[in-house]
Image (spheres, grey):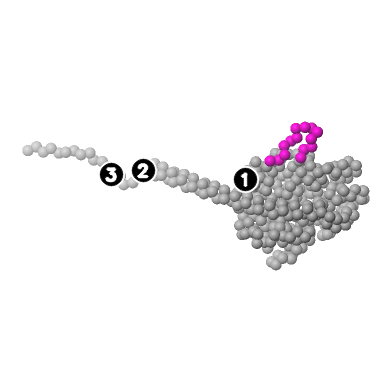
Amino acid sequence: MRRFQTHQDIRASRDGFTIIELMMVVAILLFLIATSAFVVRNIGNKAREKASMANIIKVNGLLSQRIQAFHKLLDSKRSDKLIQPRLSSKRGQLVSELGNKKYYSLTDPIVEILVRKDLFRENFPQFIGDNVKINDVMDAQPGVTAGTAGSLGSDDGLSISSEYLYFVLTQFNGLGIAPIGEDAFNASEVADTDGDGLKEFIDGWGRPLRFYHWPSRLFRPYGAGGAIRRDVAGAFFSSLPPVPTSSSERDPLEVDADDPLGRLANENSRSNGLVQTLFNDSASYYYDTTALPSLFPCEYGVLDTYSLPLIVSAGEDGILGLYEPHDFTNNGVLAQPTAVPPVEGVFDNITNHNQRAGGR
C-alpha cells in the first residue's frame, strides 16, 4: 500500500526582532522622549515667564505709587523746605567737583531741576554712588556685613540694583513716604541669591531683576550720534510714541520728563554749553570713587531725552543686552546697550514697559 506523505511548509520560527526593527523602536522612543522634554520645558518656561511678569507688574505698581507720592510732595508747598536749602549747596557742589566757578551763574529754575533730579536719584538709587546714607542703613541690618551694600559680591554685582529697589520699597522712609513692609512679598518674588544678607526681587528663573532709574542710553546709545534709536529702546519699551510727521513738531523721545519746557536746553545755549557738561554724552558715567562719601555724582542722563524707570528680567536665556546698572565705566548706570542694534538675546526680556516676553 502506497503511503502519501504530506509535505507541509516548514516556517522558520523567530526568537526576536531584527536590528532594523530595534533601531526603529529606539528612534521612536528617542523622538517621544525629546518631544516630551521639549513640551515640559516649554510649559516650565511659560510658567516662569508668567511668574516674572506678575512680579514685575507688582513691583512696578508699588514703585509707581511711590514715585507719584514723591512728585506730589515736590509739587506741594512742603517742597520749599527740601529744595530751597539745596540750591546754593548744589552750585557749590558743581564748582567743587567740576572745578568751574561759572556754575554759580546758573539760574534758580535750572538748579532746581537738578536738585529734583538729585532727590529722585537719592530716593530711588540703583548703585552705590546714588545714596551712601541708604548704604549705611542697609549695612546696619542684622546679618549684613558693613560695606556689603553696593559691593559686587559673589555674583559680580548682578543683584545690586534689585537690592536697592527692594530696600527702598519695603523699608526706606525717604522724604516721609512710608514703605510697604517686607510681608508684601513671598519667597517666589524675593530671595538673597548671592548670600550677602540683602534680599532682592527675582524673576521666574530665580535671577535678580535689574533696575535703572533713568535709562536714557536706551534711547540715545553712545556712538549713535545722539540720534533717537527706537529700534534699541523698542526691545524694552513697547508702544513708544511714533516719529512726528511734522518737522516743526518735537519728538516726544527728546523731551525730559523733569524739564518738559526745555529750560535746560535754553540755559545751555545761554551759557555756551555749560549745562551740557552735566549730562552724559561720553563713553562712561562720571563717578569719582575718591570723593567724600557725602558727595553725589554731578552727572545726569542724556540731555533732553525721555526716560522712565526700567525694571527688567533677562528672560529664559539670561542675556540682558545692557551693561549692569552699577557699571559706570561702560555707562551701565544709564542703561547703555551692549550692542547697537541690540543683541538677539534681548527679545525674550520682560520689562515693566512691555510686560511680556518678546519685547516687541
In the figure, 139 relative to 313: above or below?
A: below
Q: Which residue is drawn at 49% across and 45% down?
A: 35
Question: For this view, does 209 lie left or right of residue 40?
Answer: right
Check disc 2: other Cα within 10 Å, few if <14, some if 14-19, many if 20+. Answer: few
Tag 1 residue: 357
What secondary structure predominates along the stretch shown in magenta?
A: loop
x and y, in percent, of residue 140 in the image: 74, 66
3 or 1: tag closer to the N-terminus: 3
Q: In which quarter of the image is residue 92?
A: bottom right
Q: In which quarter of the image is the N terminus?
A: top left
Question: For this view, does 264 lie left or right of residue 12?
Answer: right
In the figure, 115 relative to 181: above or below?
A: above
x and y, in percent, of residue 119 in the image: 80, 54
Q: Which residue is drawn at 27% across and 42% down?
A: 12
Residue 24 shows in the view: yes
CA gap, disc 3 to disc 2?
13 Å
Q: Which mark is residue 151?
A: none
User: Callout 3, which amino acid?
Assistant: Ser
Q: Residue 18 carries which label?
A: 2
Which residue occupies the foreground of this view, 328 or 251?
A: 251
User: Callout 1, which amino acid?
Assistant: Ala
Q: Which mark is residue 13?
A: 3
Question: For this view, does 111 lie left or right of residue 165?
Answer: right
Where disc 3 sits, the SS reads: loop
Q: Which residue is drawn at 16% across and 38% down?
A: 6
**Residues in magenta, as a range:** 239-252
Instruction: For the residues labelled 3 and 1, say whether their Cβ atoms are less than 8 Å apart.
Output: no
CA gap, disc 3 to disc 1?
59 Å
Q: Work out which residue is located at the far bottom of the displayed protein and give it.
A: 142
CA gap, disc 1 to disc 2?
48 Å
Question: For this view, does 238 lie left or right of residue 227?
Answer: left
Disc 3 or disc 1, which is closer to the eye? 1
